[in-house]
Image (cartoon, grey):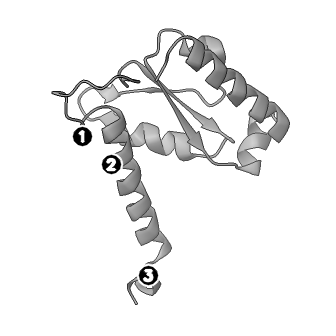
Amino acid sequence: MFMRDLTKKDGFVVFALALAAVAACAFGLCSDRSSAAAGPQPGLPAVITSAGQSPDGLVIKVLLTDKQRGPLADYKALAKPEDIAGAKTLIVAVGVSSKGLGSAGVNVDQEIARVKSLLETAKKITVS
């Protein structure tokens, strides 16, 4: 079977490609601009953070790095509401890492409170 032939490396490549496609669509590369739909319009500047302190936020930053212009979004491991002031887009990578939480010096409850506060602020200032 095809699925049994996949190695962990192959699975990561598939995951990375899927994540790149989602990120491209989030920045409007896949949208039809002729029909301007109401709703959030992602754009730059953008801030990336991780909910759970997994390395997924860094993976997104790498995928959104242009060879000539550099990173298209800032990565803030412990982004606070004041870090998203002026941002048009907030990208939250969801994934829990107990090692990441430990090295950041936060526990799960503190991380949940941080992310909730960040999302509430993003809604108030209309960050997409």
What percent of the width, then of the height, locates residue 101? 76, 41
Viewer-closest of 4 and 125: 125
Q: Which mark is residue 21?
A: 2
First in sequence: mark 2 or mark 3? Answer: 3
Q: Secondary structure at mark 3?
A: helix
- Looking at this view, is 103 or 44 the one in front? 44
Q: Earlier in the sequence, mark 1 or mark 3?
A: 3
Estimate the x, y position of residue 103 in percent, counting from the top left.
75, 39
For image coordinates 55% across by 16% down, the residue present is 84
Give the image location of residue 83, x and y in percent: 58, 15
| 16 displayed left or right of 111 | left
Residue occupying image coordinates x 63% and y 48% = 95
Earlier residue among tags 1 and 2: 2
The quarter holding residue 123 reads top right
* Distance CA(mark 1)–CA(mark 3): 28 Å
Judge the density around disc 1: few (<14), some (14-19), many (≥20) Cα neighbours within 10 Å. few
Do labels 1 and 2 touch, CB within 8 Å? yes
The residue at which mark 3 appears reads as: 3
Three-letter code for the amino acid on which mark 3 is drawn: Met
The image shows residue 1, relative to residue 125, as above or below, that is below
Q: Secondary structure beneath disc 2?
A: helix
Q: Which residue is mark 1?
A: 30
Under mark 1, the amino acid is: Cys
Q: Nearer the viewer, mark 1 or mark 3?
A: 1
Instruction: Kindly report the distance in space between the C-alpha atoms of the residues bearing marks 2 and 3.
Output: 21 Å
Residue 80: quarter of image: top right
- Packing grade of label 3 (10 A; few <14, some 14-19, many >=20) is few
Residue 68 at what x, y percent from top left?
Answer: 23, 29
